[in-house]
Amino acid sequence: MIKYIGAVVGFYLGRGFFGAVVGYFLGSAADSMFSSGSTKQTTGRRFKTVFDNATQGSVSPGDFELNLLSLASIVIKADGKVSQTELDYARQYFVRAYGKDRANATFRTFNDVIKNREVSAARICTYLNSRTRYEVRLQILHFLFGIAQADGHVSPPEVQVLSQIAGYFRINLGDFESIKAMFIKKADSAYKILEIDKSATDSEVKKAFRTMAKKYHPDKLMDMDEAYRKGAEEKFRNVQEAYETIQKERGM
């Protein structure tokens, strides 16, 4: 209950959509504290983010979580409204990936960051590009699409923002359209997911399936947290379902 009050208060105290997002997250943290008693929460260290102009090297867990939450907030406010279901989706994802204490610490630090600094998708993605593998960036895009679709509809403004983020992440157009087709269903979605045209031959369909199954195989993210592995499994299932749809359609 506190999280929803926080969202409303944050919005009307002059911070607009970011205020609502932060108010929700902080309210969620308060909910968690009250429900679990006097659980002590420590950050262990001060998180560094893209805004601190960190040096080259592997991104630390704190960096990754803060930058991911920053991108999530950009998508959440993309269509001009803050959806409760999108907020819930983002929070549940972070809790599954990092646990309540760590997720709440990330939300608190995120609040400190955006009070005085601008959140820029271009800067975040540029920072992460040299610190993450392409497969991980694909999974981030999949997660962000999941946020946009959580309220049952991916709006055109959300697609536009997601397209910009994909561009900043150097994700090729075929991969972007493939992930997009997993969330926005159309008559040719199965073909889009496999990154082929409806005019493709049966042999080309089979080859595309093998290529996409290899690209989205969950083993590629075995070193990531559980939430990311589950996301990879979901993409893999979408590829399998797309192939099965085309098989039935063509009688293969």
Image (cartoon, rainbow, N blue to C red):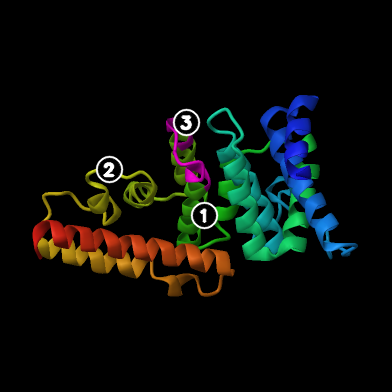
Residue 91 relative to residue 251: left or right: right
> Image quadrant for the N terminus?
top right
Above or below, 76 relative to 244: above
Disc 3 residue crowd, few under 14, some 14–19, many 20+, Cα 10 Å: some
Answer whether residue 157 is magenta in the image. yes
Counting residues from the start of the chain, the first of labels 3 and 1 encountered is: 1
Residue 63: percent from left, percent from top: 69, 57
Q: Secondary structure at mark 3?
A: helix
Disc 2 residue crowd, few under 14, some 14–19, many 20+, Cα 10 Å: few
Answer whether residue 150 is magenta in the image. yes
Residue 185: percent from left, percent from top: 32, 45
The residue depicted at 73 percent of the width and 36 percent of the height is 7
Which numbered disc covers residue 157?
3
Q: Secondary structure at mark 1?
A: helix
Return the residue at label 2: 186
Which numbered disc covers residue 140?
1
Which numbered disc covers residue 116?
none
Query: Image quarter for residue 241?
Result: bottom left
Q: Which residues are magenta?
A: 147-158
Above or below, 36 relative to 6: below
Amino acid type of disc 3?
Answer: Pro
Disc 1 residue crowd, few under 14, some 14–19, many 20+, Cα 10 Å: many
